[in-house]
Amino acid sequence: MSIEVALLIGVIGCFVGLAGWLSGRDKRISDDSHWKGSVDETLRDIKDGVSGIGERMAKIEGMAANHETRITVLESKIDKEKSA
């Protein structure tokens, strides 16, 4: 009879331990998925910002080329006025 009681306590202990392990595992999975979602959102924001920078950089390069042309024209006008 004492063996049956010890066996019963051992089986109950195993079930309690298994239940605790499963509960902890589910919590870790939930925490990991929350963390992964946060990281994915942050990376998406960074990606959007970087793609916007490329477009703005192309516009700025075009504007700089236009300004360089204007500066060259103005310099040539100033040189003509000085020589005249």
Image (cartoon, grey):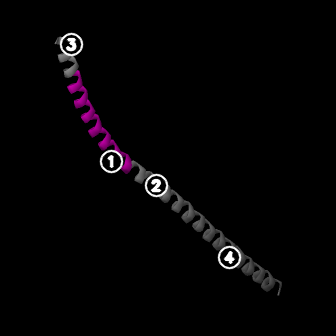
Tell me which label, 3 or 4, sits earlier in the chain. 4
- Give the magenta-colored segment's residue range: 51-75
**Residue behind mark 3:** 82
Q: Residues within 10 Å of mark 3 (few under 14, many from 20)?
A: few
Tell me which label, 2 or 3, sits earlier in the chain. 2
Q: CA distance from mark 4 to mark 2?
A: 39 Å
Q: Are the residues at dot 2 and dot 3 in contact (C-beta closer than 8 Å)?
A: no
Label 2 SS: helix
Q: CA distance from mark 1 to mark 2?
A: 16 Å
Q: Residues within 10 Å of mark 2 (few under 14, many from 20)?
A: few
**Residue placed most toward the observer, 5 or 66:** 66
Provide residue 20's location: percent of width, then percent of height: 69, 72
Identify which residue is drawn at 82% across, 87% down. Answer: 1
Provide residue 72's location: percent of width, then percent of height: 22, 25
**Residue behind mark 2:** 45
Identify which residue is drawn at 63% across, 73% down. Answer: 22
**Residue placed most toward the observer, 74 or 32:** 74
Q: Are the residues at dot 1 and dot 2 in contact (C-beta closer than 8 Å)?
A: no
- For this orientation, the residue located farthest to the bottom is 1
Is 43 magenta? The answer is no
Tell me which label, 4 or 1, sits earlier in the chain. 4
- Type of amino acid at the residue the image marks with label 4: Ala
**Residue behind mark 1:** 55
Provide residue 73's location: percent of width, then percent of height: 20, 26
- Type of amino acid at the residue the image marks with label 2: Asp
Q: CA distance from mark 3 to mark 4?
A: 93 Å
**Residue behind mark 4:** 19
**Residue placed most toward the observer, 75 or 42:** 75
